[in-house]
């Protein structure tokens, strides 16, 4: 019996030229990866609630929301890199593409290093449990929130890979880093 993939089954129903094959593969893979991420996020809620009280879980959701706002600190560097790398690839200039990627990572590293320093300094002056209305012990919360911010900033730096994946038309792989975390 011959094995057929989801991709092959869809191609039977849609008449596509070779140029669009990669896009269709990316769409199918994106749906699969996103589905796995949604299922995983639903499965983590009961696990987290088994370790944390509802109040503590609410506090961590608030911290996560604050950290999610910080993702906009990319300042357009990821999209700018994607556009410039795509341009360099279309000109077959791999040296320029490498320079663009390394410059982007250097800039993002500098911004992240600066932000980590600001968070470490500010976290000594902020009373986090009061800010997010939680009863968690201050010293425990202070340390944990500092670690969360530092890890989130490192993740922000590593997410620049998504711009490179987009430039190489491998959009289905964007966001799969979240599956690893």
Image (cartoon, grey):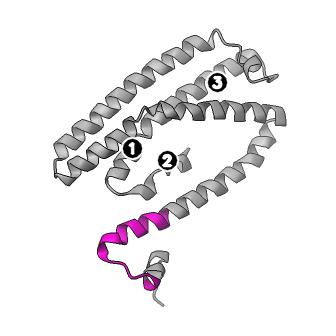
Secondary element at tag 2? helix
Q: How crowded is mark 1: few (under 14 residues within 10 Å), some or many (20 or more)?
A: many
- In the image, the segment drawn in magenta is 12-29
Residue 158 lies in magenta, yes or no? no
What is the distance, in whole Å, between disc 2 and disc 3 at their CAs?
22 Å
Determine which residue is flagged by label 1.
161
- Please indicate, yes or no, whether residue 173 appears anywhere in the rendered image: yes
1 and 2 marks in contact (CB < 8 Å): yes
Q: Which residue occupies the extreme top position in the image?
A: 125
Image side of residue 18 versus residue 66, left or right: left
Query: Left or right of 173: which side holds 22?
Result: left
Give x and y (percent) for residue 145: 64, 24
- Place of residue 79 in the rendered image (x, y in percent of width and height, measured from the top left): 38, 42
Tell me if residue 149 comes above or below residue 161 in the rendering: above
Identify whether 164 is placed above or below 5: above
Q: Determine whether 52 is above or below 162 in the image.
A: above
Please give the name of the residue rendered at 38% of the width and 22% of the height, measured from the top-left corner: 110
User: Which residue corresponds to the image point at 56% horizontal and 57% vertical from the top-left?
Assistant: 34
Mark 2 highlights which residue?
177
Real-space Cα separation, disc 1 to disc 2, in angstroms: 9 Å
> How far apart, in angstroms, are the residues tagged by discs 1 and 3?
25 Å
């Amino acid at each position: 019996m011959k094995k057929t993939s989801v991709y092959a089954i869809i191609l039977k129903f849609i008449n596509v030229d070779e140029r669009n094959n990669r896009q269709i593969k990316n769409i199918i893979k994106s749906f699969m990866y996103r589905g796995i991420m949604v299922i995983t996020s639903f499965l983590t809620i009961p696990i987290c609630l088994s370790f944390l009280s509802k109040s503590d879980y609410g506090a961590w959701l608030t911290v996560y929301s604050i950290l999610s706002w910080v993702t906009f600190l990319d300042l357009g560097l990821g999209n700018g890199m994607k556009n410039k790398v795509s341009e360099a690839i279309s000109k077959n200039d791999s040296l320029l593409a490498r320079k663009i990627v390394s410059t982007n990572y250097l800039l993002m590293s500098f911004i992240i290093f600066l932000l980590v320093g600001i968070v470490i300094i500010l976290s000594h002056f902020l009373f986090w449990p009061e800010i997010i209305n939680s009863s968690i012990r201050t010293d425990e919360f202070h340390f944990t929130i500092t670690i969360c911010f530092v890890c989130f900033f490192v993740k922000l730096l590593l997410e620049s890979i998504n711009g490179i994946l987009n430039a190489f038309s491998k959009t289905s792989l964007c966001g799969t880093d979240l599956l690893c975390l």
